[in-house]
């Protein structure tokens, strides 16, 4: 793994995974019912 492109690709993949994980966590925290599920919130 001495090639700089290998390290660049690994960094890009890690950044993409972290970005996707942060989006998933943010959706769960905000509550994704949309208020039309019958829960009574408006």
Image: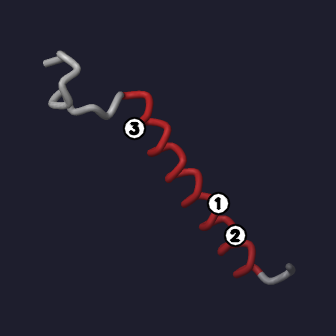
Q: Residue at x 66, y 65 (%)?
A: 11
Secondary structure under the numbered disc 2 in the rendered image: helix
**How far is disc 3 from disc 2 in space, using C-alphas?**
26 Å
The image quadrant of residue 42 is top left
The image quadrant of residue 8 is bottom right
Rendered image: mark on residue 10: 2
**How far is disc 1 from disc 2 in space, using C-alphas?**
6 Å
Disc 3 crowd, CA 10 A, few/some/many (<14, 14-19, 20+): few
Q: How is the image coloured?
A: secondary structure
Q: Earlier in the sequence, mark 3 or mark 2?
A: 2
Instruction: Residue at the far front: name it.
Output: 38
Secondary structure under the numbered disc 1 in the rendered image: helix
Q: Which residue is mark 3?
A: 27
**How far is disc 1 from disc 3 in space, using C-alphas?**
20 Å
Q: Nearer the viewer, residue 32 or 4?
A: 32
Q: Residue at x 54, y 60 (%)?
A: 16
- Residue 6: percent from the left, percent from the top? 74, 79
- Residue 10: percent from the left, percent from the top? 70, 69
Nearest to the eye among marks 1 and 3: give it. 3
Left or right, 6 with reference to 16: right
Q: How many marks?
A: 3
Q: Nearer the viewer, residue 31 or 22?
A: 31
Left or right, 39 with reference to 21: left
Q: Which residue is mark 1?
A: 14
The reply to whether the C-beta atoms of the residues labelled 1 and 2 are less than 8 Å apart is: yes
């Amino acid at each position: 793994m001495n090639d700089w492109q290998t390290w660049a690709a690994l960094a890009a993949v890690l950044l993409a995974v972290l970005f996707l994980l942060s989006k998933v966590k943010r959706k769960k925290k905000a509550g994704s019912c949309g208020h039309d599920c019958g829960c009574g919130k408006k």
